[in-house]
Each structure stands twice: as structure tokens, then as C-alpha cells.
Amino acid sequence: MPKSRALQAAPGSPPEPGLLTFTARRREKPPRHLADLTPGERRDAVVALGEQAFRARQLSVHYFDRLFDAHADVGVGGGETPAHDLLTDLPARARGPLVAALLPRLLEPVRRLECDGGTTVKTVWRLFDGALVESVLMRYPDRTTMCVSSQAGCGMNCPFCATGQAGLTRNLSTGEIVEQVVAAARALARGEVPGGPGRVTNVVFMGMGEPLANYRAVIGAVRTLTAPPPEGFGMSARGITVSTVGLVPAIDNLAGEGLPVTLALSLHAPDDELRDELVPVNTRWKVGEALDAAHRYYQTTGRRVSIEYALIRDVNDHYWRADLLGRLLSARGRGWVHVNPIPLNPTPGSRWTASDPAVQDDFVARLRRHGVPTTVRDTRGREIDGACGQLAAVSTP
Ligand code: SAH
């Protein structure tokens, strides 16, 4: 991965326009967690504590299958009972040490906001070092999608995105990503989200951060989420979407992982002149290179690629840009791609707004005329600053 082009912006001040930050400053690592480890590493960790190797599998059953929360307030006997005493299949003396070593607290909820009658829930989490991230749960009649963060902040500096304006704080670990999903699974299993007890069916890496700039932790999270229980969370890779600004070498690496996740490419402009401004990484990898990589991804995995296009009034919503995009996509073949226009969500201090509805309709119709399937994305959570591009992890109201 290339090094950052210039010194990182000071925390708190927005990065200068166009500045890209690929690597965060070195920081203390998050505590090691079961979800970070392969089954073999989990056994080794348990043996290192003087316990028998099969205890690792028991812990995995508790975490991934029974959704055991080691840090819940269980409240038995006046709240004095530690949660690990619920792990009755483990020897009493081993419970505390095993939980401390493999199920440390990674996320602490600091704020919870909901809308859509409680079926959209944004949570602000504090990480072990005080960094803040957000995740958004969206329950629909037929599925429940968890939108997770892969980094605290983001180094890609897209000027219309609130996260981009905050700069990059640090990469999340695999465990910190997985725990966002497991926390949602617990809330759904407990029936805390209207609609009855449920499961997480989809995970989208569309929260804070550029997932392909935190490649190893994100791949680790996808592997853990898709591994069959008890080793992992047992999700289908087809239910997972990785969204990227277009880090071309990383897209090619992802295609080679043998994980049929859906790739989403944040294009936002079909011409390099405008995309250089809207998605600054375009100064590294041009529209044509990003689209070629997306097409290779389709050829290798057979997974149809999504193109994300935030429609910004009078900035990128011109009819000729719809036609240009339609030509660029259809020239690479049929059936390999679909477009998700996203009405721009307002972000603090931004001068941009969403396109006029008639302009949006025309944009969609033109793409369809080029034979490109196009569906406007229903972005939930605007009222709670939880929609696409609004995640800024502000913990105070
Ligand atoms: N870094 C990844 C994931 C980011 S979020 C990426 O860029 O793909 C998911 C989507 O929300 C991206 O397509 C992003 O460009 C889009 N987005 C960002 N800000 C937005 C805004 N204000 N309104 C609508 N979409 C936005």
C-alpha cells in the first residue's frame, strides 16, 4: 500500500483538500479477541493458559452461536454475579481467565439513536483507546442489514462525506469489526428490534472507513463472519458487501480470496476531471482503471458489481454524465453491473445538496436506456445522521 502523500492532518482539523492518508499512525493495538484468531490459534491461546485445547471450541460456541456477552450486566443475585459464571460447561476456575484472555471488551456503547419505529438503529461505540466509531442496523421485512465501520475515521477525504472530513484515526481490528455484527445479533436475538427475534442476514462495509485500506482486518472479519459455526458466525458471503473508493490493487487481491462477497465501487463521476475532486483517490487510479478492476472482479467471482453514485445537485447529475456512465459500463459487457444512485445526504458545513427529483429520474432513465440496471438506494437514518456519508461519531447530542 502506498505511503501517505503528506503528513497527516492534526486531529480535529479537516484534512486539506485532496490529501490521501493510506496508513494511520502507529498506535497501541486493540486487545486480542477470539474473533481475531484462526481455530488453531484459539487452541494455542487456550493451551497457553494451561487449559485443554477443546475449551477453545466451547468458547467459540458461546460467542458465535449462543451470542454470549461477557460484559453484560447479568444481574443475578443482585448484580454481583459475573457474566462468565453463565459458562457452566467450563470449569469454574477457568472461566474468568479464559474470558479475560479471549473475550475482552472491545466496544462500549456510548449512544444509541433510532428511527423508523426502532427498525433503524445507529450506535456510537467507544473503542479501548477512546476512538469512536458508528454502526447502523437496518431491519426490513425480509432481511436485516448491519452497516459496519472498518476504520475510525477515513483517510480518503471525499469532500461530500462527513467521515472523510474527519480524517483517519486508526484501523479497526478484525475483532472490533466482528463485534459490531455480534452486538447487533444479540439485540436481534433478544427481540430488542421491532419485528420479533431475528438474525443479521447482511453486512455492508459502508460505515466509517475505507475497508480496502484496512485489508487484512477486513478479510479476517469476512472469513470469521462466513466460517460455519462454531468456528465463525455462519453468514453467507453473498450477504456481505465491501464498498470501496477504488483501490485497484486491493480489488484484484479481493477477487483472488475466493470469497464471493459483493463489491461496490463508489464512482460518483464518470469523468476523471470531476472524480479527481469528488473521490480524491482518483488521482491515483482513474475512472477507467477502477471500472476495469470492477469488471475483472465480476469475471473472477461471477458476482455482479454495484456502482454507487451519490447524486449531487448541479455537480455530477448532468444528463451527459448519465450517458457517459451508461456508455462506459455497457462497453464492458452486459449483466456484470448495476448502478445505485444515492440521493446526497446532507453533511454539516457542506454546500452540496441532493439532485432535483426530476433530474434524478432522468439520470436513472438514461442509464436504463443504455441497458444498465439501475435502482435508487433507499438510504435510511437521515434523521439520526445515520445515512450514507453522515457517520461522524459525534458522541455529544
Ligand atoms: N469508503 C467506502 C465506504 C464508504 S460509505 C467507500 O467509499 O465506498 C458508503 C457509500 O456512501 C459510499 O459510496 C460513499 O461515497 C457514500 N457517501 C458518502 N457520503 C455521502 C453522502 N453525503 N450522501 C450519500 N452518499 C454518501
Image: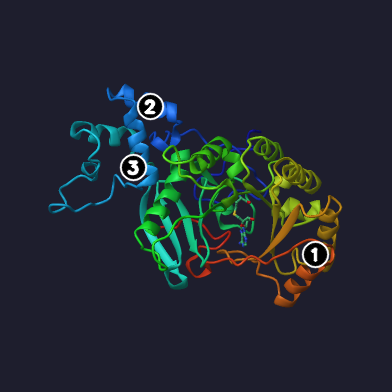
Work out whether mark 3 precedes mark 1 in sequence or the reverse, and give the earlier one: 3
**Residue positioned 35% across, 47% down in the render:** 66
Residue 210 percent across, percent down from the top left: 59, 46
Which residue corresponds to the image point at 64% horizontal and 53% vertical from the top-left?
158
User: In terms of sequence position, does the residue under pointer 2 or pointer 3 come before the other?
Assistant: 2
Task: Return the residue at label 3.
Answer: 62
On screen, residue 323 above or below 334: below
* Quarter of the picture holding the C terminus: bottom left
Tell whether circle 1 marks a residue whose Cβ is less than 8 angstroms from ligand 1. no
How far, Cα to Cα, is label 3 from label 1? 48 Å
Q: Nearer the viewer, residue 47 or 314?
A: 47
Question: What residue is drawn where x is 68% and y is 39%?
Answer: 255
Q: Position of residue 360 (x, y in %)?
A: 73, 71
Query: Which residue is nearer to you in this view: 320 or 228?
Result: 228
The amino acid marked with disc number 3 is: His
Nearest to viewer (mark 1 / mark 2): 2
Q: Residue at x 75, y 50 (%)?
A: 276
Where does label 2 land, which residue?
43
Give whichever of 187, 19 is nearer the camera: 187
Q: How many marks?
A: 3
Label 1 secondary element: helix
**In what element is the residue under mark 3?**
helix
What residue is disc 1 on? 367
Q: Position of residue 109 (x, y in %)?
A: 36, 54
Relative to residue 255, is residue 70 drawn left or right? Answer: left
The answer to whether one can see residue 388 in this image is yes
Of tags 3 and 1, which is closer to the observer?
A: 3
The amino acid type, in three-letter code, at marker 1 is Leu
Disc 2 marks a residue whose amino acid type is Arg
